[in-house]
Image: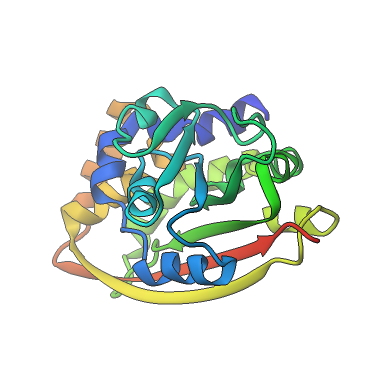
Amino acid sequence: MGDSHLRLARSFGNVAETYHRVRPGYSQEVIDRALSVLGLDARASVLDLAAGTGRLTSELAQRFTRVIAVEPDDAMRALIVDGEVLAGAAEAIPLDGASVDAVFVGEAFHWFEAADAIAEIARVLRPRGGLAVISTHWWETEPPLGDAALQLLSGPYERSLGHRKPPWDNAFAESPFEPLQLEGFEEELVVDVDELLELYSTTSSLAALPHEERAELFADVRRLLAGSYRLPVKHELAWTRLAA
């Protein structure tokens, strides 16, 4: 993983408490659907990989008797309050082989070295074990932000494009897993300007900015916004199992 990509991937620790507080919650419908399609019950042992601050871990802990959270960033990992918490990365999972029934990844697979992570996930799964990858998209607003505000907010992202990975799902084409299955779910949030900017501060390209630079950028954007904004939140569940 290159230095620039790693800096983006580990940027969330700069805003760990804000991330934990303001990110949209994981959809109960999505989680319950994952349990259903993977055939999991409360007796299953599950891994929350790249667990962040443990928001998904907490949801899983309400459903399973054994939940393990693995997270590389110290600041993010310090906020996890449920499950067995371990330092580690997707490319080097600190678990024995064939030790869990399912692996969950929430909003993180695009940061992995996909081929290495897939091999490690396959290693720690028991035969016919399942993988659920949950992604959430919420950047767009209704009404749309003005061009001036969008230009300010999107500038750091556009500068980071050369440091991002290609689509991760392509790496499953020749893997020990069955073809990925994709399902979509939608909901919405209504936020005021301050809440919207807090959300944006937890995106990688903005979280990676030095604190003073980020604060100055948001002060400029805040002057351009007013009222409330509706966020159409799109959840995607990608799931698969180890092939027989």
| Residue 80 on image: x %, y % | 33, 35
Question: Foreground: 120 or 68?
Answer: 68
Residue at the (35%, 49%) spot, across then down: 61
| Residue 30 on image: x %, y % | 44, 69
**Residue extending furthest front?**
43
Question: Foreground: 10 or 154?
Answer: 10
In screen coordinates, is 1 left or right of 186? Answer: right
| Residue 87 on image: x %, y % | 49, 25
Residue at the (58%, 31%) spot, across then down: 89
Question: Is residue 122 among the parts visible in the rendering?
Answer: yes
Residue at the (48%, 31%) spot, across then down: 10
Question: Is residue 209 among the parts visible in the rendering?
Answer: no
Question: Foreground: 191 or 95?
Answer: 95
Is residue 107 positioned above or below 29 on the image? above
Quadrant that contains the C terminus: bottom right
In screen coordinates, is 14 left or right of 121? Answer: left
Question: Foreground: 216 or 182?
Answer: 182
Is residue 51 positioned above or below 190 on the image? above
